[in-house]
Amino acid sequence: MASKQQSCIVCQCPDSTVRFDGILQCTRCSHVYADLERYVSTDLELLYQEEYFSGAEYSDYVADRPVLQQNFRRRLRVLLRFVDRAEDKSLLEIGCAHGFFLDVAGPFFARVEGIDISAGAVTYARERVGVRAVCGNFLSHDYQGGLFDVICLWDTLEHLPEPHRFLAKAFRCLNDGGIIALTTGDIGSAVAKLRGRKWRLIHPPTHLHYFSRMSMRRVLRNQGFVPVYRSSCGFSRSADNAAHGVLALRLGRPELYQWLRKHGLLGWSFNLNLFDIMYVIARKRSLSEGRDQVSGLGK
Ligand SMILES: [Zn+2]
């Protein structure tokens, strides 16, 4: 079955086939994306209100702060390897939510700030975490000529209807030699292939784009970036959030989740690397670099 509703954001091909119910695949480059005609009728801001962080997707994002910050510290350690003299540099996080990454990164940079469309999360970031953050859409926000040295999108690109436009604007908002650092699911991974439609990261309307290593490299190059690092990125997760995801959301057994929680059985966390989340760092290509030099990483 073919669809001609929208063009591929990686190669602009207008044709797609149905990969799973509600999920399309580009016939030319194989990029996988949600059927936006079906899913983007809802207002994105409405998806990311308090409910998203306390029940709809996360069990309790704020209570998970220590575990989330463990993840962010690990990502930051890798990122700092690619930033010379970070203490003189500025960092912007797109999709900063409650500011937990900005809090961790702040001491290492001259200036860190964030942007997020969730008003409640941004208020929390400013008032409770004490970091600089604005509520708004990165695409329409006016940075008034201010440029950054590092732009981060942690688990954010997959949420965006037009991620390529975010990358294009990120390019314009970066100083020469600036870098972009991001994490997102890898639909080419063994786990994603094995699980098919049941892969835990396939859940429109909050996840709309499903990159593979190949489509990620291509979309970055299209927007003027040279990939310089890629790995599979593990994560720490609280038992509470994992149990909420499996019992309450997947299996429809919220009472079992509540019972475990009430009896104090979910107060621990664990590390996991399923090799299905990619961590990519890419450098802004300078004007003097020709396309031939943009070899990126291997396949
Ligand atoms: Zn395509």
Image (tube, grey):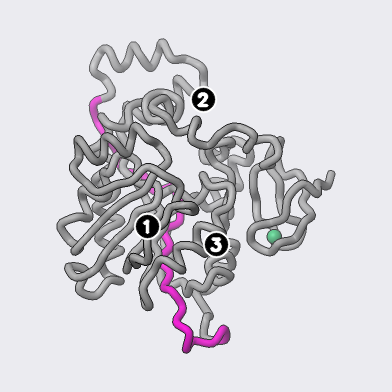
Asked whether residue 243 appears in the rendered view, the answer is no
Q: Is residue 167 above or below residue 200?
A: below
Q: Quadrant of the image for the N terminus?
A: top right
Question: From the viewer's perspective, is the residue at label 1 or at label 2 nearer?
Answer: 1
User: Residue placed at 19% from the left, 55% from the top?
Assistant: 106
Q: Amino acid at mark 3?
A: Met
Name the residue tied to disc 1.
152
SS type, badge 1: strand
Q: Earlier in the sequence, mark 1 or mark 2?
A: 1
Mark 3 to mark 2: distance in Å? 28 Å
- Placement of 229 over or under 129, stated as above or below: below
Q: Nearer the viewer, residue 70 or 182?
A: 182
Q: Check mark 2 vs ligand 1: CB closer than 8 Å? yes or no.
A: no
The quarter of the rendering in which ligand 1 is drawn is bottom right
Q: Image check: 285 left or right of 34? A: left
Question: First in sequence: mark 1 or mark 3?
Answer: 1
Disc 2 marks a residue whose amino acid type is Arg
Does the stretch in magenta take in 280? Answer: yes
Pick whichever, 263 or 174, lies toward us.
174
Which residue corresponds to the image point at 58% horizontal and 47% vertical from the top-left? 161
Report x, y in % for residue 103: 21, 48
Locate residue 249, reporting x and y percent: 49, 23
Q: Please say if the residues under marks 3 and 2 sit with CB atoms less than 8 Å apart.
A: no
Where residue 26 appears, as percent x and y from the top left, is 72, 55
Crowdedness of circle 1 by 10 Å Cα count: few (<14), some, many (20+)? many
Q: Which residue is mark 2?
A: 250
Q: Residue at x 27, y 33 (%)?
A: 64
Q: Is residue 98 visible?
A: yes
Residue at the outermost left position:
107
- Circle 1 or circle 3, nearest the eye: 1
Q: What segment carries the magenta color?
A: 267-292
Give the residue pinned by disc 3.
216
